Amino acid sequence: MTERRAGVEKLGIMGGTFDPIHNGHLFVAEEARGAAGLDRVLFVPSGTPPHKRYAGMADAEARYDMVRLAVQGNPYFDVSRIETDRRGRSYTLDTLQEMSALYSNSRIYFITGDDAVLDMLNWHEPYAIARMATLLTVGRPGYARDKISELPQEIRGSVRTIDSPQLDLSSTDIRRRVRAGRSIRYMVPEDVRRYIDDNGLYTDSDGELH
Ligand code: ATP
Ligand code: MG
């Protein structure tokens, strides 16, 4: 199923807060890349929101740095500053539009976990997003994949579900573990673990988010 037209690159975009990036994110992106034959995957950490969404949220530069460290060993992965540098609130649609202008020779694939795709009607302009990109979604423990069929056809039509093992990792849980003094080794790349440690991230907050 490797329909690759000459000159047309298949570009995966993996958006997230990445607070911090963990092995679940990396695995999801790698599985999506393999299943859809993507030429590369750009990770796009969100910028600084006007109001921190919870106490102890790491700033945009720290989250960007951790993503950079996490992707550096994979030749297919890269990180973008597009949302890090944007003033004010970032919308996925704006990012996808900028990406498709920047990489006009690419087909855009937006990579998510099932929790995100199931929440899509709450996003800004979900129908426009579905028209712009194929949505590649990977299973996440606790989220019912069969509910995707209840999304409106205009959205469902661009969703492609990917079968892969599921990893029960979340940034929320990782932040909690750090706060509790528990190890996060093997849940995040070693360079990320060291960055969190060196910078004392997530030690004194009560950040709760899912
Ligand atoms: P938080 O707990 O802070 O919400 P998170 O682990 O959900 O963090 P996000 O940055 O919110 O990470 O998610 C970015 C993207 O990665 C979303 O599309 C989300 O669905 C996906 N994702 C994160 N963790 C997993 C996982 N373990 N399995 C599948 N998808 C995941
Ligand atoms: Mg999340």
Image (cartoon, helix red, strand yellow):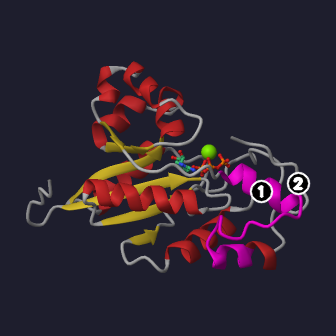
Q: Which residue is mark 2?
A: 205
Let me know if residue 173 appears in the view: yes
Tell me the residue at 57%/41% (across/down).
Answer: 141
Residue 8 is situated, as x and y percent measured from the top left of the image, at: 16, 61
- The one of 139 and 132 positioned closer to us in this rendering: 139
The segment highlighted magenta reads: 170-195
Residue 175 falls inside the magenta stretch: yes
Q: Residues within 10 Å of mark 1 (few under 14, many from 20)?
A: many
Q: Quadrant of residue 86?
A: bottom right
Residue sticking out furthest to the front: 165
Q: Which residue is mark 1?
A: 175
- The one of 9 and 151 positioned closer to us in this rendering: 151
- Quarter in which the C terminus is drawn: top right
Residue 159 falls inside the magenta stretch: no
Residue sticking out furthest to the left: 6
Q: On the picture, is 94 further left or further right than 57?
A: left
Q: On the picture, is 95 further left or further right than 171?
A: left
Q: Residues within 10 Å of mark 2 (few under 14, many from 20)?
A: some
Marks 1 and 2, how far apart at CA: 9 Å
Q: Amino acid at mark 1?
A: Arg
Q: Quadrant of residue 69?
A: bottom right
Q: Is mark 1 within 8 Å of ligand 1?
A: yes
